[in-house]
Protein backbone atom coordinates (compact mmCIF):
# COMPACT_ATOMS: atom_id res chain seq x y z
CA UNK A 1 0.00 0.00 0.00
CA UNK A 2 1.48 3.31 -1.07
CA UNK A 3 1.07 6.55 0.80
CA UNK A 4 0.83 9.93 -0.85
CA UNK A 5 3.02 12.61 0.73
CA UNK A 6 1.42 16.00 1.22
CA UNK A 7 3.84 18.88 0.81
CA UNK A 8 3.01 22.21 2.37
CA UNK A 9 4.88 25.45 2.59
CA UNK A 10 6.45 26.06 6.00
CA UNK A 11 4.50 28.44 8.25
CA UNK A 12 5.63 32.04 8.29
CA UNK A 13 6.65 33.22 11.75
CA UNK A 14 7.27 36.81 12.78
CA UNK A 15 9.19 36.05 15.93
CA UNK A 16 10.64 32.66 16.92
CA UNK A 17 14.09 31.21 17.01
CA UNK A 18 16.76 31.21 14.31
CA UNK A 19 16.54 27.49 13.57
CA UNK A 20 12.96 27.87 12.33
CA UNK A 21 13.74 30.99 10.32
CA UNK A 22 16.85 29.50 8.69
CA UNK A 23 14.74 26.77 7.08
CA UNK A 24 12.48 29.34 5.41
CA UNK A 25 13.29 30.50 1.88
CA UNK A 26 15.36 33.68 1.80
CA UNK A 27 13.38 35.39 -0.96
CA UNK A 28 9.97 35.44 -2.55
CA UNK A 29 11.44 33.83 -5.67
CA UNK A 30 12.81 30.93 -3.64
CA UNK A 31 9.47 30.45 -1.91
CA UNK A 32 7.66 30.54 -5.26
CA UNK A 33 10.12 28.01 -6.67
CA UNK A 34 9.51 25.66 -3.75
CA UNK A 35 5.76 25.99 -4.19
CA UNK A 36 5.99 25.17 -7.90
CA UNK A 37 8.28 22.24 -7.16
CA UNK A 38 5.77 20.94 -4.60
CA UNK A 39 3.00 21.28 -7.17
CA UNK A 40 5.05 19.32 -9.71
CA UNK A 41 5.78 16.60 -7.15
CA UNK A 42 2.07 16.32 -6.37
CA UNK A 43 1.24 15.95 -10.05
CA UNK A 44 3.98 13.34 -10.52
CA UNK A 45 2.78 11.39 -7.47
CA UNK A 46 -0.78 11.39 -8.81
CA UNK A 47 0.41 10.15 -12.22
CA UNK A 48 2.45 7.35 -10.63
CA UNK A 49 -0.45 6.32 -8.42
CA UNK A 50 -2.81 6.21 -11.42
CA UNK A 51 -0.33 4.07 -13.35
CA UNK A 52 -0.03 1.73 -10.38
CA UNK A 53 -3.83 1.50 -10.17
CA UNK A 54 -4.02 0.58 -13.86
CA UNK A 55 -1.59 -2.28 -13.25
CA UNK A 56 -3.46 -3.36 -10.14
CA UNK A 57 -0.84 -2.56 -7.50
CA UNK A 58 -2.89 0.25 -5.93
CA UNK A 59 -6.60 0.45 -5.27
CA UNK A 60 -8.82 2.67 -7.36
CA UNK A 61 -9.73 4.59 -4.22
CA UNK A 62 -6.10 5.55 -3.64
CA UNK A 63 -5.81 6.67 -7.25
CA UNK A 64 -8.92 8.83 -6.93
CA UNK A 65 -7.58 10.40 -3.73
CA UNK A 66 -4.28 11.15 -5.47
CA UNK A 67 -6.11 12.70 -8.45
CA UNK A 68 -8.30 14.80 -6.18
CA UNK A 69 -5.31 16.00 -4.18
CA UNK A 70 -3.42 16.95 -7.34
CA UNK A 71 -6.49 18.73 -8.72
CA UNK A 72 -6.90 20.68 -5.47
CA UNK A 73 -3.25 21.74 -5.55
CA UNK A 74 -3.63 22.86 -9.16
CA UNK A 75 -6.82 24.79 -8.36
CA UNK A 76 -5.06 26.63 -5.54
CA UNK A 77 -2.08 27.46 -7.76
CA UNK A 78 -4.40 28.74 -10.49
CA UNK A 79 -6.28 30.89 -7.99
CA UNK A 80 -3.03 32.37 -6.68
CA UNK A 81 -1.89 33.08 -10.23
CA UNK A 82 -5.18 34.83 -11.04
CA UNK A 83 -4.93 36.96 -7.89
CA UNK A 84 -1.33 37.92 -8.70
CA UNK A 85 -2.27 38.95 -12.25
CA UNK A 86 -5.21 40.95 -10.93
CA UNK A 87 -2.99 42.73 -8.39
CA UNK A 88 -0.42 43.52 -11.09
CA UNK A 89 -3.11 44.93 -13.37
CA UNK A 90 -4.50 47.05 -10.54
CA UNK A 91 -1.07 48.49 -9.81
CA UNK A 92 -0.38 49.20 -13.48
CA UNK A 93 -3.73 51.03 -13.82
CA UNK A 94 -3.04 53.38 -10.90
CA UNK A 95 -2.63 57.04 -11.90
CA UNK A 96 0.82 58.60 -11.44
CA UNK A 97 -0.01 61.93 -9.86
Image (cartoon, rainbow, N blue to C red):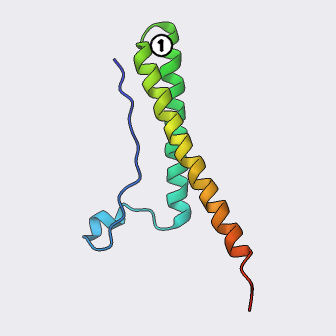
User: Who's the residue at 50% across and 38% down the image?
Assistant: 72
User: Who's the residue at 48% across and 13% down the image?
Assistant: 53
Q: Nearer the viewer, residue 20 or 74?
A: 74
Q: Which corner quadrant of the image does residue 4 belong to?
A: top left
- For label 1, the crowd category at 10 Å Cα-Cα, with few meaning under 14, some 14 to 19 and many 20 or more, is some
Using the image, determine if residue 24 lies above or below residue 36.
below
Horizontal side, residue 27 vs residue 23: left or right: right
The quadrant in which the C terminus is found is bottom right
Which residue reaches farthest top? 56
Residue 33 in the image, given as x and y percentages of width and height: 55, 54
Residue 49 in the image, given as x and y percentages of width and height: 47, 21
Residue 41 in the image, given as x and y percentages of width and height: 50, 38
**Mark 1 = which residue?**
53
Which residue reaches farthest left? 17
Q: Nearer the viewer, residue 73 or 33?
A: 73
Horizontal side, residue 75 vs residue 6: left or right: right
Residue 12 in the image, given as x and y percentages of width and height: 36, 64
The quadrant in which the N terminus is found is top left
Using the image, determine if residue 11 lies above or below residue 66.
below
Q: Nearer the viewer, residue 67 or 91?
A: 91
Using the image, determine if residue 90 lies above or below residue 95.
above
Q: Quick one: SS at disc 1?
A: helix
User: Who's the residue at 71% across and 79% down the image?
Assistant: 94
* Count of numbered marks: 1
Horizontal side, residue 17 vs residue 22: left or right: left
User: Who's the residue at 73% across and 74% down the image?
Assistant: 92
Horizontal side, residue 84 vs residue 4: left or right: right
Amino acid sequence: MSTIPITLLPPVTLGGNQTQQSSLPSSFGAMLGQAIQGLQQGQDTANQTIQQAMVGNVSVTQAMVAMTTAQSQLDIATSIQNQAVSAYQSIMNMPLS
